[in-house]
C-alpha cells in the first residue's frame, strides 16, 4: 500500500514539474515577443513606461479612439465625440468614458515623446 502511495506522489510531482516548466517557457517566450514589439533598448523602455503609467498599450489606445495613426487632430476629434456620446446623462457609461480618457492620455504621452524628436530636424545653414 505504501509503495502505491509513493508512486502516486512521485507521478504527481512529475506532472506538476512538467506543467511548471512548460508555463515558464511560455512566459519567457511571451516576454521576449513583447520586448521585440516594443522596439527594445531605450525606445522599448520608454514605451513600457508609458504603457505602465496609463495602463494601456499604444495599439489599445488607438483602437479605443478608432484611429489608424497618431494624428493630434483626429485624436482630439474622436475623443470629443466618443466622450460626449458616452456621457452618463445621455445613458452612456462612466466606465467607457474613463477608458476613452485613458486612451487619450496614452496617445498624448506618445505625441509628447515623439514631438521633441521631430522638432530637432536638420540644422539651418547660416552661410
Image (spheres, rainbow, N blue to C red):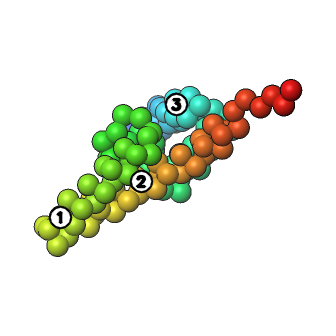
Kindly state the secondary structure of the residue where label 2 is placed: helix
* Residue ID for mark 2: 104
Crowdedness near tag 2: few (<14), some (14–19) or many (≥20) residues, C-alpha within 10 Å: many
Residue extending farthest right:
127
Q: Which mark is residue 37?
A: 3
Residue contact between numbered discs 3 and 2, judged by CB atoms under 8 Å: no
* Front residue of this view, candidates 123 and 17: 123
Residue extending farthest left:
91
The residue located at (46%, 36%) in the rendering is 23
The location of residue 63, given as percent across then percent down, is 33, 41
The location of residue 13, given as percent across then percent down, is 46, 39
Please identify the quadrant where the N terminus is shown: top left
Residue contact between numbered discs 3 and 1, judged by CB atoms under 8 Å: no
Crowdedness near tag 3: few (<14), some (14–19) or many (≥20) residues, C-alpha within 10 Å: few
Residue extending farthest bottom:
89
Q: Along the polypeptide, which appears first: circle 3 or circle 1?
A: 3
Kindly state the secondary structure of the residue where label 1 is placed: loop
* Front residue of this view, candidates 86 and 78: 78
The residue located at (38%, 59%) in the rendering is 101
Q: Along the polypeptide, which appears first: circle 3 or circle 2?
A: 3
* Front residue of this view, candidates 89 and 73: 73
Q: Along the polypeptide, which appears first: circle 1 or circle 2?
A: 1
* Residue ID for mark 1: 92
Crowdedness near tag 1: few (<14), some (14–19) or many (≥20) residues, C-alpha within 10 Å: some
Residue 101: tell me if it is visible: yes
Residue 1: tell me if it is visible: no
The location of residue 29, given as percent across then percent down, is 52, 29
Kindly state the secondary structure of the residue where label 3 is placed: helix
Q: Can you tell which quarter of the image residue 4 is in? A: top left
Mark 1 vs mark 2, CA separation in Å: 18 Å
In this view, the mark in front (3 or 1):
1
Amino acid at each position: 500500500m505504501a509503495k502505491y502511495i509513493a508512486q502516486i506522489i512521485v507521478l504527481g510531482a512529475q506532472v506538476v514539474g512538467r506543467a511548471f516548466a512548460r508555463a515558464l517557457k511560455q512566459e519567457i517566450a511571451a516576454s521576449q515577443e513583447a520586448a521585440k514589439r516594443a522596439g527594445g533598448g531605450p525606445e522599448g523602455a520608454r514605451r513600457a513606461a508609458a504603457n505602465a503609467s496609463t495602463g494601456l498599450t499604444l495599439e489599445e489606445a488607438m483602437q479605443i479612439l478608432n484611429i489608424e495613426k497618431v494624428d493630434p487632430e483626429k485624436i482630439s476629434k474622436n475623443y470629443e465625440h466618443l466622450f460626449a456620446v458616452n456621457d452618463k446623462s445621455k445613458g452612456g457609461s462612466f466606465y467607457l468614458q474613463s477608458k476613452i480618457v485613458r486612451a487619450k492620455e496614452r496617445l498624448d504621452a506618445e505625441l509628447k515623446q515623439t514631438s521633441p524628436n521631430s522638432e530637432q530636424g536638420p540644422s539651418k545653414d547660416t552661410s
